[in-house]
Image (cartoon, rainbow, N blue to C red):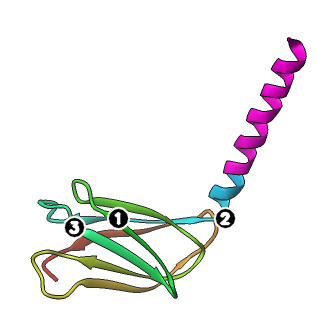
Amino acid sequence: MRKALLELCLLIAAIAGIHTVRVMRSGFINGKLYPATTSESVLAINGSDSVRTISKNGYFGMKVRPGIWKVIVAAKSQTGGIIRDNLEVNEGQSVNLGEIRLTE
């Protein structure tokens, strides 16, 4: 019984360590859309890699790999999107785009 409990604790510690390393090898892009009346699509592009999310109450966030990213907000009220270019994201870093006005 003790051996099984010890093995379980070691397994849990190993899994937690793997997830910690995975989080440290990624970054985060977040921001707030104004006005926050509808859910807008937010897309981040880095070469052939892309991540898409939907804003909730105006807030959005996405986990991305380190690198140079372009973020596009596809606002329903506009024909084009709002673009933020050349966003450098490093390991373990969070890039806050602040408030993005959809009336730009």
Q: CA distance from mark 2 to mark 1?
A: 20 Å
Tell me which segment is drawn in magenta: 1-19
Left or right of 77 on screen, residue 1: right
Q: Which residue is mark 3?
A: 40
Q: Amino acid at mark 1?
A: Thr
Whichever of labels 3 and 2 marks the residue nearer the N terminus, that label is 2
Q: Position of residue 47 (x, y in %)?
A: 52, 88
Q: Position of residue 99 (x, y in %)?
A: 27, 68
Vertical placement of residue 50 versus 24, above or below:
below
Disc 3 crowd rating (10 Å Cα; few below 14, some 14-19, many 20+) is many
Disc 1 crowd rating (10 Å Cα; few below 14, some 14-19, many 20+) is some
Element type where label 3 sits in the image: loop
Q: Position of residue 97 (x, y in %)?
A: 37, 71
In the image, what residue occupies the spot 85% across and 22% down?
Answer: 6
Q: Amino acid at mark 2?
A: Arg
Q: CA distance from mark 3 to mark 1?
A: 9 Å
Residue in front for this viewpoint, 104 or 72: 72
Q: CA distance from mark 3 to mark 2?
A: 28 Å
In the image, what residue occupies the spot 25% across and 83% down?
Answer: 82
In the image, what residue occupies the spot 63% across and 56% down?
Answer: 23
Q: Position of residue 45 (x, y in %)?
A: 44, 81
In the image, what residue occupies the spot 78% across and 34% down?
Answer: 11
Q: Amino acid at mark 3?
A: Glu
Vertical placement of residue 62 versus 82, above or below:
above
Disc 2 crowd rating (10 Å Cα; few below 14, some 14-19, many 20+) is some
**Quarter placement of the C terminus:** bottom left
Kindly identify which numbered label has been placed on residue 86: none
Q: Main secondary structure of the magenta part?
A: helix
